[in-house]
């Protein structure tokens, strides 16, 4: 039986592994694999947690109050649940420095997508233009992945930007605010479409309404941000759990891969790892290795491997990420209404802005504010706290947020490189410089978004728009682009490294272009495609 | 006065209480907790909120990075004497020192109130006024805030200068 070692259990790793197993390969997955704490009061809704949890401050704010956001911070509008802290907890020995970029890594089972909001947006043929294969070769895998993870949504006005695919289930029940917004869109549609080229429709989410296998359907507990206790919202650790029961699959947790070793013909032959707690070395013979540790970690592994193999680590250029801008808004029709806590919490609607170049499409995730913590928002109102609280009580049901995503392109000035110390340890240097035209692009887009919101009966309070730092979206890609032909620092259309044969990159490292969309759905589809095309029967 | 709902359900002891921290309760902290919660919610804090407030201070998460200045501590002491003073000083600090000790303490209490019923439910309940009344109140809140900031700036300026002078000396 042919054997492949997979590094990382994130969205790409588990779907690559699943397809490789389906194709008869033996798969060994090496992973740090930090585990999630057990769900607390799994049947309780968000409101019930506040009534019934014995220590709600411990649950919502953390025992060390790490979930409390104090004034003067970075300006994010929500606190991160403390029990999700394991997802972003750093790893000793993995050093990283950055300029112009706030990098995030994960060493959790399931990786960064354990904290995603489920956005499953297929790329259009225009957006796949730089990918070195016919778009159809990838597009059919959107259906494969949707069948595995469960994607809900609708083929509506946004279909011009979000093509339909197989296994697209009907969307969840809309929350009251989203329904009001969609109704307003229907009335304002002719003007919005014509004047702003703005389209609104149902978002696409990896969330199930129906029961299947071990996963329950969404029952609108309002705990999406707090980790869905019913697993209606898909995360890769669900797939990993299923893989653990399959023949031919070996999972090696608690190990961090440090490099791969190559033979004289520059083909990988061995994987080197160490135990995260005791440092014990582990070596695995492997003629084929698939890196799925995420763009930053996979790149560092390649650079460390090249350094050990040839004595020099080059600079990888073309790092991409989606710039995100948060635009809070108030829906005037919902002022003084009671907020609906028992509802799906993440984006149920999306807003698309068409641009002259279809690759410059702007995607907005429309989230109506329901069961996030309120203190980060109340403190940002420019009044004393008691007055701000009075306003918030009357405006809670009317609040929403558009998370505006911008596309990114590969540029020489955005790079990853290694800095080595005398003790042979290495530090990954991340450099990012935004495109020169970015400020103007953001300005003109926000003008359109705010005009669109006005047409929908909403207004964006001045001074509250927040440009997130680069790196915050965690949609990293692009440093080892797939190309039909290219140099050592490129990969084949199957993601195989041209520097080290037998080494495959099945994560975002190989994307040659990043549209304004969460790339996770495409990561999974591409990983399954590579497994079928390069790891067939 | 205790919150009626919490009377029925004893507060779970947090880590600080479990470690016996409650035996070293600072009466000044308890007092400011009481006054600040009344300012934010119009009710007294439950035992649970009070205990968690003290635990947060024990854990050292309330102090601003680099430590609070003498002026900030003085502001907190003054604020803890009456709810109307909290409002006035909160308005001043919102404009001139948003990340100050008083603001951090108030935001911490807001975070504690919002995670525990019945405070949480009250914070999510609209006041029930008509749209016209709401607009009127909004305008009044804005005007009152501006006037408060103006007045407190004038009153506090000599004290602020004195603290600066003392710090330099």
Image (tube, grey):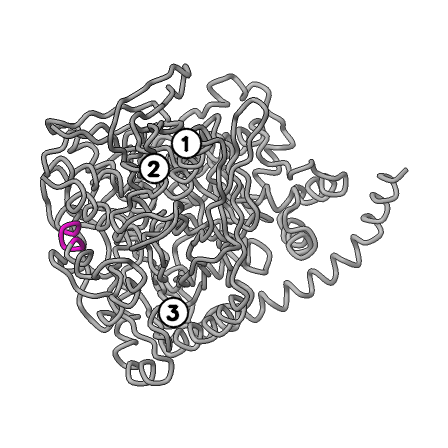
Residue A61 is situated, as x and y percent measured from the top left of the image, at 44, 37
Q: Secondary structure at mark 1?
A: helix
Q: A432 above or below A505? A: below
Going by the image, does A535 lie left or right of A326?
left
Residue located 81% across and 54% down the image: B157
Residue A499 is situated, as x and y percent measured from the top left of the image, at 37, 40
Chain under label 1? A
Q: Which residue is mark 1?
A: A305
Residue located 49% across and 44% down the image: A315
Q: Nearer the viewer, mark 3 or mark 2?
A: 2
The numbered mark at residue A360 is 3
What's the magenta region? A141-146
Mark 2 vs 1: CB contact within 8 A? yes
Separation of marks 2 and 1 at Cα, in angstroms: 9 Å
Tell which of A34 and A96 is nearer to you: A96
Residue B34 is situated, as x and y percent measured from the top left of the image, at 57, 39
Magenta stretch, main secondary structure, is helix
Q: Residues within 10 Å of mark 2 (few under 14, many from 20)?
A: many
Q: Residues within 10 Å of mark 1 (few under 14, many from 20)?
A: many
């Amino acid at each position: 039986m042919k054997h492949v070692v997979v590094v990382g259990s994130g969205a790409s790793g588990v779907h690559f592994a699943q397809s490789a197993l389906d194709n008869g390969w033996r798969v060994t997955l090496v992973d740090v694999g930090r585990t999630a704490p057990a769900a607390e009061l799994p049947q309780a809704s968000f409101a019930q947690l506040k009534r019934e949890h014995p220590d709600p401050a411990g649950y919502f704010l953390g025992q060390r109050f790490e979930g409390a956001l104090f004034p003067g911070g970075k300006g994010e509008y929500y606190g991160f649940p403390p029990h999700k802290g394991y997802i972003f907890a750093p790893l000793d020995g993995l050093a990283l420095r950055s300029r112009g970029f706030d990098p995030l890594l994960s060493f959790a089972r399931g990786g960064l997508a354990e904290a995603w909001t489920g956005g499953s947006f297929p790329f259009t043929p225009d957006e796949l233009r730089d990918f070195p294969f016919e778009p159809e070769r990838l597009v059919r895998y959107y259906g494969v992945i949707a069948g595995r993870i469960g994607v809900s949504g609708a083929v509506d006005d946004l279909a011009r930007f979000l093509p339909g695919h197989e296994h697209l289930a009907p969307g969840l029940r809309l929350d009251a605010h989203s329904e009001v917004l969609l109704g307003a869109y229907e009335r304002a549609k002719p003007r919005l479409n014509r004047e702003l080229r703005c389209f609104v429709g149902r978002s696409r989410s990896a969330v199930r309404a129906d029961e299947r296998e071990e996963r329950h359907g969404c029952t609108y507990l309002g705990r999406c941000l707090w980790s869905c206790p019913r697993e209606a919202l898909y995360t890769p650790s669900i797939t990993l759990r299923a893989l653990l029961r399959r023949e031919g699959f070996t999972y090696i947790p608690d190990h961090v891969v440090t490099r791969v070793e190559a033979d004289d013909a520059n083909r990988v032959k061995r994987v080197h790892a160490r135990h995260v707690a005791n440092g014990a070395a582990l070596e695995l013979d492997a003629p084929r290795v698939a890196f799925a540790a995420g763009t930053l970690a996979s790149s560092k592994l390649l650079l460390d491997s090249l350094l050990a193999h040839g004595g020099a680590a080059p600079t990888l250029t073309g790092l991409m990420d989606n710039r995100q801008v948060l635009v809070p808004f108030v829906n005037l029709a919902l002022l003084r209404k009671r907020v609906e806590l028992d509802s799906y919490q993440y984006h149920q609607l999306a807003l698309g802005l068409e641009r002259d170049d279809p690759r410059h499409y702007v995607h907005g995730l429309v989230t109506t504010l329901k069961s996030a913590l309120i203190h980060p928002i109340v403190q940002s109102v420019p009044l004393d706290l008691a007055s701000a609280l009075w306003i918030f009580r009357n405006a809670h049901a009317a609040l929403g947020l558009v998370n505006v995503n911008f596309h990114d392109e590969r540029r020489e000035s955005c790079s990853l490189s290694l800095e080595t110390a005398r003790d042979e340890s290495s530090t990954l240097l991340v450099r990012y410089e935004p495109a020169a035209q970015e400020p103007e692009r953001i300005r003109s887009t926000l003008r359109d978004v705010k005009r669109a919101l006005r047409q929908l009966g909403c207004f964006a309070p001045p001074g509250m728009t927040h440009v997130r730092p680069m790196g915050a979206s965690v949609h990293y890609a692009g440093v080892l682009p797939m190309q039909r032909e290219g140099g050592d620092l490129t990969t084949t259309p199957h993601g195989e490294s041209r520097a080290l044969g037998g080494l495959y990159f099945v994560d975002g490292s190989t994307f040659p272009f990043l549209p304004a969309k969460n790339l996770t759905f495409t990561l999974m589809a591409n990983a399954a495609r590579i497994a079928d095309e390069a790891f067939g029967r | 006065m205790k919150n009626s709902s919490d009377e029925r359900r004893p507060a779970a002891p947090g880590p600080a209480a479990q470690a016996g921290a409650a035996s070293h309760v600072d009466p000044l902290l308890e007092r400011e907790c009481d006054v600040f919660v009344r300012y934010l919610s119009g009710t007294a804090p439950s035992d649970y909120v009070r205990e968690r407030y003290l635990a947060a201070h024990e854990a050292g998460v309330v102090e601003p990075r680099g430590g609070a200045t003498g002026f900030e501590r003085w502001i907190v002491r003054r604020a803890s004497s009456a709810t109307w003073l909290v409002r006035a000083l909160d308005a001043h600090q919102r404009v001139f020192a948003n990340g100050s000790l008083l603001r951090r303490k108030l935001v911490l209490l807001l975070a504690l109130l919002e995670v525990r019923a019945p405070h949480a439910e009250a914070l999510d309940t609209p006041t029930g006024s008509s749209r016209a009344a709401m607009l009127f109140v909004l305008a009044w809140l804005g005007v009152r805030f501006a006037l408060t900031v103006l007045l407190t700036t004038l009153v506090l300026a000599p004290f602020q200068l004195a603290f600066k002078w003392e710090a330099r000396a």
